Image: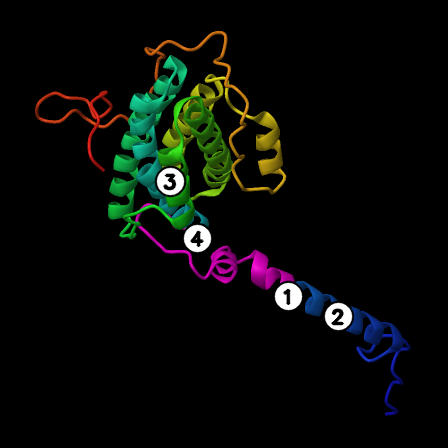
Amino acid sequence: MRPRPPVKGRGVFSGTGLIVTCLAATLAALVFPIWSYTDQPETAPNVLSAHTLQTSHGPLSALDQDFLTKVRLAGLWELPAGRQAQSKGTTPAVRTAGRHLVEGHRFLDERVRDVAGRLHLDLPDEPNEQQRQWLDRLDRAQGAEYDREFANILRLAHGKVFSVVAQVRASTRNSLVRELADDANSTVLDHIKVLEATGYVDFDAVARDLAGDSAPPAADPGPAVPPPSSPSPDYTLPPPAYSPPPDQNGTSHTDNTPSGL
């Protein structure tokens, strides 16, 4: 019996079959690299941040770690600056701002040391060089010049950390850092408001700072004019998102009594 000739166009290696096979192979080569990254959610964070630490409270990113360090550094120099303003400020508004700094950063410093301990993260024990320079400027200033220096240096410093707090709050995946960012947000915003209420803040300097000029403004040699309506010394502090329990004597951690670092 004579063999049947192959039917035209039915073999895998016919013209149409060969074209389809080549297209399928090309598509697979394009899709596989995309699948290999998008279908494995744990791959991207490890590649993007080699400094991310895994904790029982969620990943602790490099930004989270930097945030904790910045909160601790803020307390190391703004607490003494606030205490100084309470006694050295010449207007009720400046002294009120100093009191807010003391109470707010005492609370945040206690919180950040607790969070860092639970996350096994080391924190600095003294201000950095720039912060020491700011404290030196405040030590040398007197009278109305001191009021202006205090309001502007502290307002610029708080403006910088405020944007960091917002970034951390929006991106962190660590529950302890998220709670601390909530407290830092309300505290820093309160400090910005009371510093601006002194009437000495140079908003042009703040704008320059946001544009990239980080140097605090020099004190204006002209006479200082106190704000027409200064806040009362009893200006209410905002409630924190996290309230620590009172100690054994029933004293709140946010009382007005100055304490050491």
Distance from Cα at disc 3 to Cα at disc 4: 31 Å
Distance from Cα at disc 4 to Cα at disc 2: 39 Å
Residue 19, quarter of the rendered image:
bottom right
* Residue visible at 38% across and 35% down in the picture: 140
Residue 136 is tagged as 3
Placement of the C terminus among the 4 image quadrants: top left
* N-term-proximal mark, 1 vs 4: 1
Q: What amino acid is at disc 4?
A: Ala
Residue 26 is tagged as 2
Indicate whether 230 appears above or below 98.
Answer: above
Q: What amino acid is at disc 2?
A: Thr
Label 1: how many residues lie within 10 Å, few (<14), some (14-19) or many (20+)?
A: few
User: Magenta region: which residues?
Assistant: 32-60
Q: Are marks 3 and 4 in contact (CB under 8 Å)?
A: no
Label 4: how many residues lie within 10 Å, few (<14), some (14-19) or many (20+)?
A: few
* N-term-proximal mark, 3 vs 1: 1
Distance from Cα at disc 1 to Cα at disc 2: 10 Å
Residue 225 is tagged as none
* N-term-proximal mark, 3 vs 2: 2
* Res 178 visible: yes
